[in-house]
Image (spheres, rainbow, N blue to C red):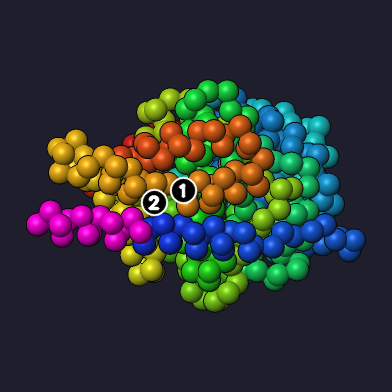
Amino acid sequence: MHEWSFFVIEFLVATYAIFTLVLWFLWSRITSISPTKNRPSPKISVIVPVRNEAQHIGALLKDLNHQTYNPLLFEVWIVDDDSSDNTAYLVDTFIKNSSIQLKIIRLPNSFSLTSPKKRAIQAALTQATGKLIITTDGDCRVGPDWLTSLAECYKSTQARLISGPVTFTPEGTLTAHLQTVEFSSLIGSGAAAIAAGSPSLCNGANLAYEKKAFEEVGGFTGNEHLASGDDEFLMHKIAARYPGSVQFLKDPRAIVRTVPHSSWVGFYRQRKRWASKWKHYSNPVSIALAMYIFTCNAALIVAFVFGLLSVLSWPHVFVILLTKWVPECFFIGGVLSFLQKPKSLLYIPLVQVIYPFYVAFFGLAVQKPTYVWKGRRLS
């Protein structure tokens, strides 16, 4: 029985190491979009769903006001979801002195709503005039060439959906560095999956898609009852309707930076919402991949427990761990370097120790389908 268990663990870890090396290869093969002399000109609608973002919204509005993209070719829709702070007031004040086309939509409260973010985006889409829809969040920061980079990618690839890179604002704490490393693995994995022709992960904090494509696949229809997934489920639908039309934008100018969670409670709530999505994937490859990653990380926990029980020798356990960790270091290190996070490289080993327990915990936590977002309890 023990020999069979050892074989299963070793097989899973070995295949995971190969899988990680494939991700690293795919990531390294993604070509960057270079600035072009002929400036792109699609009309863009930027949609920013917000709720209680008074602390951050001003910085994002300033970033949008300083975009190098032609201000006549983009509009910004701030969708305020019944904020209880002065978010709406700050937006109204900014509009008076703004040099861009900036508008605000106020949504009434809805306690029975399952997915407030989808409602916010949909409300703006009914009024948006852009050919290309770009979404981000109220606590994000964007560089001056953000819209230009996305527009250039759209022009050169004719992609129906573009997934952009996301990381965190400068880290000042251990937990912030840990979040940066963990999140970079998701960004890299999502980019590699897109490069492989099987889009799986993306992030609504930096997402662009054709309004026409959104409408043709039925938008959020079919998953509007889910608390999360306004980004990934839409990507899956567009990828199924238009094979090969999804692109990852590997361009430093396009990096969006958001605020890491300062509390473990906030981190737990966010990751629980994210982890809940995999059960609703319609793509069998995405479902199988989620289960495979869970199983491989659970195998590491089993190997560690076997070491404590002296069922496995510690040299054997360390070989198993290193088989998984070494390829991960190369892959995550490459993504962090692109995201301009050299200081976070030092925290990769610590995240690797924690990550199997993290995956197992959230895999079990999502079995209780109740989530909290911006002070609302969703289910």
The structure residue drawn at horizontal position 41% and vertical position 40%, both measured from the top left corner, is: 352
Q: Would residue 334 be found to the left or right of residue 351 on screen?
A: right
Neighbourhood count class around disc 1 (C-alpha, 10 Å): few under 14, some 14–19, many 20 upward: some
SS for tag 1?
helix
Q: Would residue 352 be found to the left or right of residue 102 on screen?
A: left
Q: Residue furthest right?
A: 37
The structure residue drawn at horizontal position 15% and vertical position 57%, both measured from the top left corner, is: 3
The structure residue drawn at horizontal position 27% and vertical position 46%, both measured from the top left corner, is: 316
Residue 358 position, x and y percent, is: 34, 40
Rounded to the nearest angstrom, the CA distance separating label 2 from label 1 is 6 Å
Neighbourhood count class around disc 2 (C-alpha, 10 Å): few under 14, some 14–19, many 20 upward: some
Q: Using the rendered view, name the quadrant where residue 55 is placed.
A: top right
Name the residue carrying label 1: 326
**From the image, which quarter does the C terminus lie in?**
top left
- Please report the bounds of the magenta region as a residue range: 1-14
Q: Principal SS element in the magenta part?
A: helix
The amino acid marked with disc number 1 is Val
Q: Residue furthest left?
A: 1
Taking 292 as reference, is 173 above or below it? above
Residue 61 visible: yes
Residue 48 visible: no
Q: Tell me if residue 82 is in the magenta stretch.
A: no
Name the residue carrying label 2: 323
The amino acid marked with disc number 2 is Thr
Residue 284 position, x and y percent, is: 35, 70
Residues at discs 2 and 1 in contact (Cβ within 8 Å): yes
Q: Tell me if residue 9 is in the magenta stretch.
A: yes
Q: Using the rendered view, name the quadrant where residue 154 is placed.
A: bottom right
Q: Which numbered marker is on residue 84?
A: none
How many marks on residues? Answer: 2
* Front residue of this view, candidates 192 and 38: 192
Taking 300 as reference, is 197 above or below it? below
